[in-house]
Amino acid sequence: MKVACITIEGENAIISADKFDWLCAQAAKVEKLEKVAEAAVRVVTWDWSDNDAECEADMRLLRAAVEAL
């Protein structure tokens, strides 16, 4: 992909195509990390005195999100 320039909040910034590709890759990583954080929030808010099916399901979602990294 050849990118000559991108617009950031109304300003023009000229960056190389490899830097643009790197930025896109970082954005994808951030999306995955956000999923891990959301799953972790669900897990830590449970009352762990009883391990019911919902707790275990949230743990599986957290594991899957971490493994997707």
Image (cartoon, helix red, strand yellow):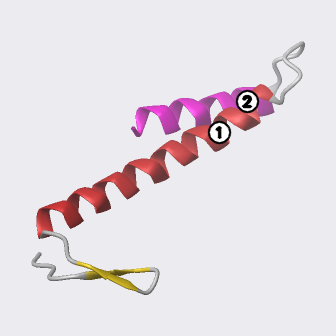
Q: Are marks 2 and 1 in contact (CB under 8 Å)?
A: yes
Distance, label 2 to label 1, CA atoms, is 6 Å
Q: Position of residue 38 (x, y in %)?
A: 66, 43
Image mark for residue 23: none
Q: Is residue 12 above or below residue 41?
A: below
Q: Is residue 49 above or below residue 40?
A: above
Between 47 and 50, the one nearer to me in the picture: 47
**Is 11 within the magenta?**
no
Report whether 7 appears left or right of 42: left
Q: Amino acid at mark 2?
A: Val
Mark count: 2
Which residue is under mark 2?
Answer: 43
Displayed quadrant of residue 50: top right
Report whether 64 appears left or right of 11: right
Image mark for residue 39: 1
**Is 57 within the magenta?**
yes
- Tell me the chief SS of the magenta region: helix
Between 5 and 18, the one nearer to me in the picture: 5
Under circle 1, the secondary element is: helix
Under circle 2, the secondary element is: helix
Identified at 20% across, 77% down, the residue is: 14
Residues rendered magenta in the picture: 54-69
Query: Which quadrant of the figure contains the N terminus?
Result: bottom left
Displayed quadrant of residue 25: bottom left
Q: Residues within 10 Å of mark 2 (few under 14, many from 20)?
A: many
Q: Position of residue 44 (x, y in %)?
A: 76, 26
Q: Position of residue 27 (x, y in %)?
A: 39, 57
Displayed quadrant of residue 4: bottom left
Between 32 and 5, the one nearer to me in the picture: 5
Q: Amino acid at mark 1?
A: Ala
Identified at 10% across, 78% down, the residue is: 2
